[in-house]
Amino acid sequence: MRVSKLVSKTLREVPADADNISHRLMVRAGLIHQLVAGVYSYLPLGWRSLRKIENIIRNEMDKAGGQEINMPVLHPAELWGDRMSDIRFTLFDRRERKLTLGPTHEEVVTSLAARYVRSYRDLPLNLYQIQVKFRDEPRPRGGLIRAREFSMKDAYTFDVDEAGLDVAYDKVFQAYQNIFTRCGLDVMVVEADSGAIGGKDSREFILTTPAGEDEVIFCPACDYAANAEKASSVKEKIDGGKPLPLETVATPGMKSIEEVAGFLKVPPSRTLKAVFYIADGTFVFGVIRGDLTVNETKLRNQLHCADLRLATEEEVIAAGIVPGSASAVGLKGIRVIADDSVSSGVNFVAGGNKPDTHLKNVNYPRDFKVDIVADIARAVAGEKCIKCGGKLSSTRGIEVAHIFKLGTIYSTKLGANFLDEKGESHPIVMGCYGLGPSRLLAAAVEQHNDDKGIIWPVSIAPYHVYLCPLPREGSKVTEVAEKLYQDLQAAGIEVLFDDRAESPGVKFNDADLIGLPFRITVSPRTLEKDAVELKKRTEKDPQIVPLSEIISKLKALI
Amino acid sequence: MRVSKLVSKTLREVPADADNISHRLMVRAGLIHQLVAGVYSYLPLGWRSLRKIENIIRNEMDKAGGQEINMPVLHPAELWGDRMSDIRFTLFDRRERKLTLGPTHEEVVTSLAARYVRSYRDLPLNLYQIQVKFRDEPRPRGGLIRAREFSMKDAYTFDVDEAGLDVAYDKVFQAYQNIFTRCGLDVMVVEADSGAIGGKDSREFILTTPAGEDEVIFCPACDYAANAEKASSVKEKIDGGKPLPLETVATPGMKSIEEVAGFLKVPPSRTLKAVFYIADGTFVFGVIRGDLTVNETKLRNQLHCADLRLATEEEVIAAGIVPGSASAVGLKGIRVIADDSVSSGVNFVAGGNKPDTHLKNVNYPRDFKVDIVADIARAVAGEKCIKCGGKLSSTRGIEVAHIFKLGTIYSTKLGANFLDEKGESHPIVMGCYGLGPSRLLAAAVEQHNDDKGIIWPVSIAPYHVYLCPLPREGSKVTEVAEKLYQDLQAAGIEVLFDDRAESPGVKFNDADLIGLPFRITVSPRTLEKDAVELKKRTEKDPQIVPLSEIISKLKALI
């Protein structure tokens, strides 16, 4: 491709609305163009890279036994009920039938299985598609990182039992590892919450980058890694001696854990904190050790609620609770959930349920009752690993894939059953596996760049080589470059040929911004030696390579 | 691929809602599955064929200098105004912004050109995409022939002038010819009406098949061919002697052209027929020779109206017109449009504008005035060709592609301009080019089938070979077939391997229904001769081919 013919142009100005590196670079390098918030056109360079990613995915999914299909964007809304209604686009057709734009395809693919699977002999199955999906995100951001229209590879496996699902899940897991390796991306596998789709075991693939919106807690000493939403840590026992009798103390004006702990000269870990939520409209009283914070994903899972939010001060007072001095001691008629840290020590300081009053020597379960005790605490770096006791670290990243063991949730709901050898009917055991090619494209740029532009991994670069002639009047540079352009392509090397009448500075800046793995410069100076200059985008200095060797040299590198 | 593993199954029953051959066969062969009216999932066999078609298209578009991009499904509705509002799906996002699902992409691509094209040096450009499109058709039918969600390859060219557009148009025209030839399809190029997209010259590619919903008028003696919406024919002069004085005659009870002509003993071609329309809410009086019928597409184009329908009898009477005895003679205050056949003869019979009364010797323009005289007649088979005078024929087919010279309609509307060598600004001259891969898939099946099933052209068949072992207890059939399955694939031949424990009849029926180009049968009988049976789907009788030669024989055929 000749740069002079390319529809997209590089841009010097940084787009005003671009809130992260990949978004800025992708717009400036001419890979994408926004049509409306969270909705992008792919220009030729961006589209080439996306198709390379998709083809790597397709190849690995086929090797893992996947059958490629393609399901529609338009779904009848009744197939969905209320599921994901907060982010689904809905519309009505000319006959006033309510439709929805597919945000994912569990329902549709399960309906297909219900139609075509009859017996155990039809299983196992692995169906996948690479298709456009739609989610009306409240805050589309980061260019392709969180778009409203995006590309998704979604796969679904169908098995007769859990053992079959385990095999299918492991196959896709390995395919995903292969995909990220082939794309040249550094991706971490972490334990994950199952979220809105439902199901049990699930893992996420997180591409590590400081700008990522996901936090990962991991142990450098072992293989433990989990999304912060899911991560656990050891809650160490705090030696507080023997349980002592309850004691009321005046704490005038002291409301926060810090104030109370400071006033009573105990560490926050010797206090119990009260937190108040509204879960699907019902008031919930939470208790957690004062040095820990609540993980709302864990809380939501324990409460099995769809909607969860902090209670307002008005709602707290209306529930008969004294903000700043609340504890579960003596509490009646309100649902209480406690983090299991309430058992990690004795003689805690807690609220006295009267203004300016706290209690000392509060002990569980002696002094208060709870409805649920579970891990609802947020794990943080510095705490101990639950697997090996090592010191946990944290990092940030972008979720680029997510795999789930769904079990029979959808097959039961949609009647996707099979007959076993004895002729008995059972629901099919399913797994589902999502991987976002367009988000992966952006994440790759987010992970691979410098202050000059993108640094493409070879396998997903739009082209391999940026061919950059620097002609001077009377030189043979243009002639040699034109011939090299043809010869490189004939050798199967993909070339972006900067045939413009621009200065070396402009050309080099564009080469760095677009970020192809290799830049070849042809100039009167290099031609004196019958050579060209080869520069890797990852290296600072170019090398001189004889013209006669440049093709074989590049072929070895690609 | 093993048939035993394939998610889709062939179906014996004919789907109740399938109204044409391709729809029935595609459902029965397991290529597609309907989710909701006009919206289909592609199963593995259908998806493979569609991707082969898409790759042929991509390859030919690239050769024609196209740059592949990908534009979004979601468009801001304001970009569209009222255009195509009758078939656009619209919706509102969470911020109540009105969006539309793209039925085509002229507006979006022109906006891209407005963003990136600055000077004549940035032109010419050819941008294309293969992408999913949405039209809320009043009557989705024929499976993929007229779907509401469908695949489209749309291309757009951008040039500095009409001469550039002509070159660009011819290149895409040639690419399309190559595509249909490579897909093994018989496609006719016809002149076409520009329809809703706007523009001037346009041609359609019609895949001929009796079930097609488009009618084509063509001349077997020359290269004239046009969609019936657009077709013209010679309106021969009728010798009626010299104009005679107007004469009133009583025609008691005679209303239709046939009745009046029979009563007055003149052929219908010696009468003038009156027809009444409502065009964008306004009454229009039409006049055409009695033996011809109005072509509403031509009428709509002449009237430049969006909405056109026949007037009701109430509306005709309310306009002061006497149904059954109407003519334009003496008519006032009503817009009159006449087919140019009013000049093709003299002394016509026409309505007397009083009940049971007609006029003889009506002559144009002596006796009545019209606002527009133009060709608004429907051409029919048997009439004379306007190019060579030959006798026109007609045939039916499916429109699979449509190309337009748009000119500057969209570039003017959306401010897509370029600066010429002198620094003067001009609107970019555009062409647009649509080709429907999913419709083409269905049309291919519509054109290539017999009473047993589909007959795939090799280039777009889901697989090349249906490998059909017929094992008998103690034979080596399974072993040989398994090895052949591996060897064929290693040779690059795509194989669907019927490894099921089914009877020969079931396997042969499925092979014919799915319709791969070649069937190989391995049986104890063929193995006696160290051979297999090779049957082309297009031929009745199989041939015996030695096992050692089958791969080279197939490679030569594919």
Image: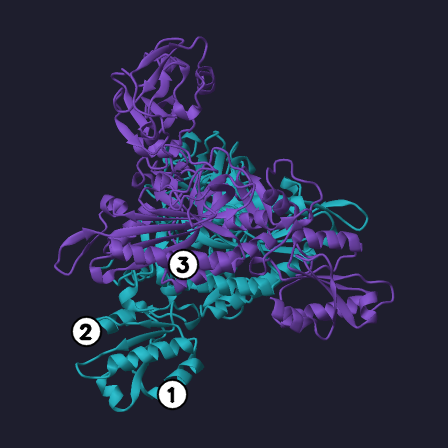
Chain colours: A cyan, B purple
Which chain is home to disc 1?
A
| In this view, the mark in front (1 or 3) | 3
Q: CA distance from mark 1 to mark 3?
A: 39 Å
Horizontally, residue B530 falls left or right of residue A136, namely: right
Quarter location, residue A136: top left
Element on which disc 1 rests: helix
- Residue B257 percent location from the top left of the image: 44, 20
Residue A12 to residue B162: above or below: below
Residue at x 30%, y 24% (from the top left corner): B242
Residue neighbourhood size for the residue with mark 2, other residues' Cα within 10 Å, grouped as few (<14), some (14–19), many (≥20): few
Q: Amino acid at mark 1?
A: Glu
Q: Residue at x 74, y 61 (%)?
A: B542
Nearer the observer, A355 or B236: B236
CA separation in Å, label 2 and label 1: 27 Å
Q: What's the amino acid at mark 2?
A: Ser
Q: Which residue carries the number 2 mark?
A: A503
Position in image of residue A371 (x %, y %): 57, 40
Quadrant in the rendering for residue B337? top left
CB of mark 2 within 8 Å of CB of mark 3? no
> What SS does tag 3 mark?
helix
Residue pointed to by mark 1: A549
Residue type at numbered disc 3: Gln
**Residue assigned mark 3:** B174
Question: Badge 1, how many Cα within 10 Å: few under 14, some, many 20+?
Answer: few
